[in-house]
Image (spheres, rainbow, N blue to C red):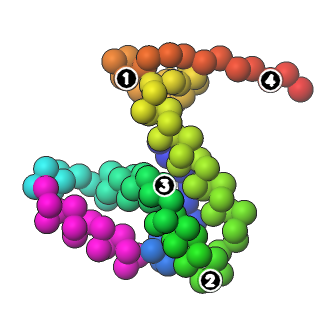
């Protein structure tokens, strides 16, 4: 999954991200092998896992000048991809674009829209 996330987002949550990363490394040594992108994805998924944390972070982002519509769209996309990963539902385009292993695919979708 690759989401284009505004740099302003990472600047605002930088302190929270560092705390999260430190906590994860302290609790489980397996996370030492994770690179920055993997930690960022884990951080984003953990945000949407808990509604209270998501609301607090959204409030923090809005108070620091981020567009609420952008934040809602970002959280929606994270939740959507998390659902896709959990249930193994991918479109053929996503399978090709993200190089999803065949073992992770439980169901495929094809939705075409003609203009």
Q: CA distance from mark 4 to mark 1?
A: 26 Å
**Mark 4 crowdedness (10 Å alpha carbons): few <14, some 14-19, many ≥20:** few
Identify whether 38 is placed above or below 101. below
Dominant secondary-structure state across the stretch colored magenta: helix
Considering the numbered disc 4 on the image, is that residue within a helix, a strand or a loop?
loop
Residue sitting nearer the eye, 111 or 52? 52
**In the image, which residues are magenta?**
14-28
Considering the numbered disc 2 on the image, is that residue within a helix, a strand or a loop?
helix
| Residue corresponding to mark 1 | 104
Disc with the residue nearer the chain's start (2 vs 3): 3
Q: CA distance from mark 2 to mark 1?
A: 39 Å
| Residue corresponding to mark 3 | 48
Disc with the residue nearer the chain's start (4 vs 2): 2
Identify whether 101 is placed above or below 3. above
Q: CA distance from mark 4 to mark 2?
A: 38 Å
| Residue corresponding to mark 4 | 113
Disc with the residue nearer the chain's start (3 vs 4): 3
Q: Closer to the camera: disc 3 or disc 4?
A: 3
| Image quarter of the C terminus | top right
């Amino acid at each position: 999954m690759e989401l284009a996330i505004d740099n302003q987002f990472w600047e605002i949550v930088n302190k929270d991200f560092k705390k999260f990363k430190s906590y994860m490394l302290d609790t489980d040594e397996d996370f030492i092998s994770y690179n920055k992108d993997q930690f960022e994805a884990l951080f984003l998924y953990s945000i949407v896992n808990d509604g209270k944390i998501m609301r607090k972070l959204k409030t923090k982002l809005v108070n620091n000048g981020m567009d609420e519509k952008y934040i809602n769209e970002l959280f929606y996309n994270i939740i959507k991809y998390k659902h896709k990963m959990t249930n193994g539902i991918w479109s053929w385009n996503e399978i090709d674009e993200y190089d999803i292993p065949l073992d992770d695919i439980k169901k495929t979708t094809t939705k075409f829209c003609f203009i």
